[in-house]
Amino acid sequence: MRYEITVDLESCDGIFACLVRDGRFREADDGLVDLPGSDRDGTRLTATFEDDRIDEARDAAAACPVNAIEVREVSDA
């Protein structure tokens, strides 16, 4: 399954509830969140994955108290 995780860095408060739900989330040097292989575009962090860990990503998004994380499936088109 291919899916994208997007983090709104303006909303992220560095609470890191996501880290306990999905080990791919890490603290960045600026005190906000980071993901392996992610692209930072101003106030957005985006990473695409193709694996069976979408439920972990969804759990991380659901745990975010400021709703800064979005997870969506993407097609191969």
Image (tube, helix red, strand yellow):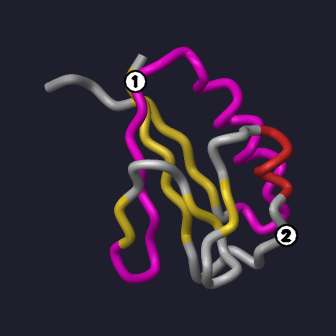
Q: Are marks 2 and 1 in contact (CB under 8 Å)?
A: no
Q: Residue placed at 70% from the left, 47% from the top? A: 61
Q: Where is residue 33 in the image (x, y as percent from the top left)?
A: 64, 66
Q: Residues within 10 Å of mark 1 (few under 14, many from 20)?
A: few
Give the quadrant of residue 60: top right
Q: Return the disc, 2 or 1, that comes first in the chain's sequence.
A: 2
Secondary-structure class at tag 1: strand
Q: Is residue 19 above or below residue 27?
A: above
Q: Position of residue 65 (x, y in %)?
A: 85, 63
Which numbered dot is residue 50? 1
Q: Position of residue 55 (x, y in %)?
A: 68, 24
For the C terminus, give its image quadrant.
top left
Q: Residue placed at 38% from the left, 40% from the top? A: 48
Give the quadrant of residue 44: bottom left
Residue 23 lies within the magenta run: no
Which numbered dot is residue 15? 2
Looking at the picture, tell me which residue is in the foreground, 5 or 51: 51
Q: In this view, does 67 lie above or below 52?
A: below
In the shown orientation, is residue 40 left or right of residue 66?
A: left
Q: Residue placed at 66% from the left, 77% from the top? A: 11
For the N terminus, give its image quadrant.
top left
Which numbered dot is residue 69? none
In the shown orientation, is residue 16 left or right of residue 36?
A: right
Q: Residues within 10 Å of mark 2 (few under 14, many from 20)?
A: some
Tag 1: amino acid: Glu
Tag 2: amino acid: Ile
Query: Which stretch did the figure color magenta?
Result: 41-67
